[in-house]
């Protein structure tokens, strides 16, 4: 790949190794490109052990962990920053003062990728939509025995740089893009050929000064599109239609009901109703790309959800255990609580909630807990304190209950699962849908979900 030649013998500093695969993928890519790679992270070597193990075969990488060193940012040709690093970082200011080029892995991918890119963003639903589009495209290539390869990555825990060297012009690339990744693309003035915005509601307000700023960040997915590019949004989403009315490409308004009508019997009844718009987006994009109905129908018949997103982990003694760890904001968790309660009818709902506070309003989520949960098992964190206060001092009516849910504190995920296990009975459900971030007690939200899944599978 010609672009990778630009980094040969250059000094490249990976800022933020992380645990989601992006930092490790970037380190592997630049090492393979012949760069002199240094990795720096605030976390310790012990905390980052899983990512370091992935790079064990890559020789010559220098690790400066447990903190950043100013000299590393002065004495390098490139800084490749993790999307989670804020632009106002004092270390990035040092790099800029030294004339260092600052890039993200997303920028590197967009500049070098030979194939057209399908990008998906949104507050919720982007992982499901991304996965389904990828599966639809893959199934079509199998059905027609085509040589086109489909690459899926981005914010879906698969580093896009890991497969960049093998992407060809005739391939298809599907990327989940977070608001942080879209912010990084802004300086390169690049957007994907096909863009999807699933929805936008409050999130990451500890990073963005206002809801408007957050929405404008999401708008980066279409801001730099060209006239021949496409943007897919929900026809019924007034806020999104207003945000995208000046999109430079062609806007496709997706009618959820119409998009799903030919596949009504293919979608399993176990798939929550709030996934239907995500499925509709994926169907609309797939059909735009020439995918046939048989391929779409075949994938939908197998679809039961993406891990960590309303994932049915196990049923133990008639009690359903559901992993929705990616509900890191109160609005997403509210929807999960309502959906599961509808699904179990008169059964009781036990919710595992709380964690790191992102500064989001928790009132509506707490109202849903008061109305629909029999008990809430809280994990440690600042958001927990606010949620407990809202529930105990609730000023909203309880329509079908005589008392507020029981509140229990747990110090660990196994402890939280044990509390629910001891109290739940046949016909009940236990839902991990925190409505908060995972920092502090867990490595990240997927570690939180993995710990929940392991604890549930250990039940007898």
Image (cartoon, rainbow, N blue to C red):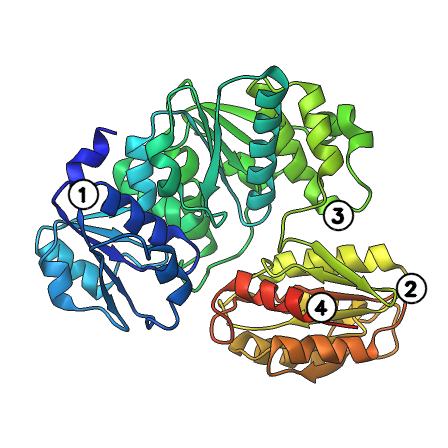
Q: How far apart are the two marked residues, 1 and 3, measured between alpha carbons?
A: 47 Å
Looking at the rendered structure, the secondary structure element under dot 4 is helix
Q: Where is residue 115, by image quadrant? A: top left
Mark 2, residues whose alpha carbon is within 10 Å: few (<14), some, or many (≥20)? few
For marks 4 and 1, give the one nearer the viewer.
Answer: 1
Q: Mark 3: few, some, or many residues within 10 Å (few <14, many ≥20)?
A: some
Q: Of the two numbered discs 2 and 4 on the same chain, state the one appearing first in sequence.
A: 2
Q: Which residue is mark 4?
A: 456
**Residue 119 left/right relative to 33:** right
The Cα–Cα distance between marks 4 and 1, rounded to whole angstroms, is 45 Å
Which label belongs to residue 34? 1
Residue 130, horizontal then vertical, whole percent: 55, 38
Q: Residue at x 60, y 79 (%)?
A: 412
Residue 272 circle label: 3
Q: Which mark is residue 346?
A: 2
Residue 258, by quadrant, is top right
Q: CA distance from mark 1 to mark 2?
A: 62 Å
Q: Which one is in front in this view, the residue at disc 2 or the one at disc 4?
A: 4
Res 394 seen here: no
């Amino acid at each position: 790949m010609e672009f990778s030649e630009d980094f040969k013998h250059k000094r490249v500093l990976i800022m933020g190794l992380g645990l989601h695969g992006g930092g490790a993928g970037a380190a592997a890519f630049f090492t393979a490109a012949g760069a002199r790679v240094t990795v720096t992270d605030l976390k310790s070597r012990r905390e980052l052990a899983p990512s370091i193990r992935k790079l064990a075969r890559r020789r010559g990488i220098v690790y400066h962990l447990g903190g950043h060193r100013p000299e590393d940012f002065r004495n390098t040709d490139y800084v490749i920053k993790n999307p989670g690093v804020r632009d106002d970082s004092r270390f990035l200011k040092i790099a800029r003062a030294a004339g260092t080029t600052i890039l993200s892995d997303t920028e590197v991918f967009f500049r070098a990728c030979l194939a057209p890119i399908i990008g998906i963003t949104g507050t919720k639903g982007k992982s499901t939509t991304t996965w389904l589009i990828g599966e639809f495209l893959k199934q079509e290539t199998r059905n027609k025995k085509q040589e086109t390869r489909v690459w899926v990555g981005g914010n879906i825990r698969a580093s896009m740089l890991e497969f960049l060297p093998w992407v060809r012009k005739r391939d298809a690339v599907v990327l989940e893009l977070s608001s942080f990744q879209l912010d990084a693309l802004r300086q390169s003035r690049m957007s994907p050929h096909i863009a999807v915005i699933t929805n936008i509601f409050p999130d990451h307000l500890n990073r963005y000064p206002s809801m408007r700023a957050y929405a404008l960040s999401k708008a980066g997915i279409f801001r730099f599109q060209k006239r021949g590019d496409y943007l897919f949004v929900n026809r019924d989403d007034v806020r999104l239609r207003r945000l995208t009315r000046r999109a430079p490409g062609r806007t496709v308004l997706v009618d959820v009901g119409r998009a799903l009508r030919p596949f009504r019997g293919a979608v399993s009844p176990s798939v929550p109703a709030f996934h239907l718009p995500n499925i509709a987006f994926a169907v609309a994009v797939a059909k735009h790309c020439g995918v046939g109905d048989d391929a779409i129908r075949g994938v939908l018949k197998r679809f039961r959800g993406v891990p960590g997103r309303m994932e049915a982990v196990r049923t133990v003694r008639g009690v359903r255990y559901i992993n929705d760890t990616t509900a890191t904001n109160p609005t997403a968790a509210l929807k999960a609580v309502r959906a599961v309660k509808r699904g179990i009818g008169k059964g009781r709902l036990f919710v595992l909630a709380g964690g790191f506070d992102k500064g989001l309003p928790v009132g509506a989520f707490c109202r849903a807990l008061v109305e629909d949960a029999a008990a809430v098992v809280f994990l440690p964190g600042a958001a927990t304190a606010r949620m407990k206060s809202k529930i105990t001092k609730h000023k909203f009516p309880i329509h079908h209950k005589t008392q507020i849910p029981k509140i229990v504190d747990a110090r660990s995920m196994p402890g939280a699962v044990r509390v629910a296990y001891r109290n739940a009975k046949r016909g009940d459900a236990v839902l991990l849908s925190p409505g908060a971030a995972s920092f502090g007690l867990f490595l990240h939200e997927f570690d939180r979900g993995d710990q929940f899944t392991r604890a549930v599978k250990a039940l007898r």
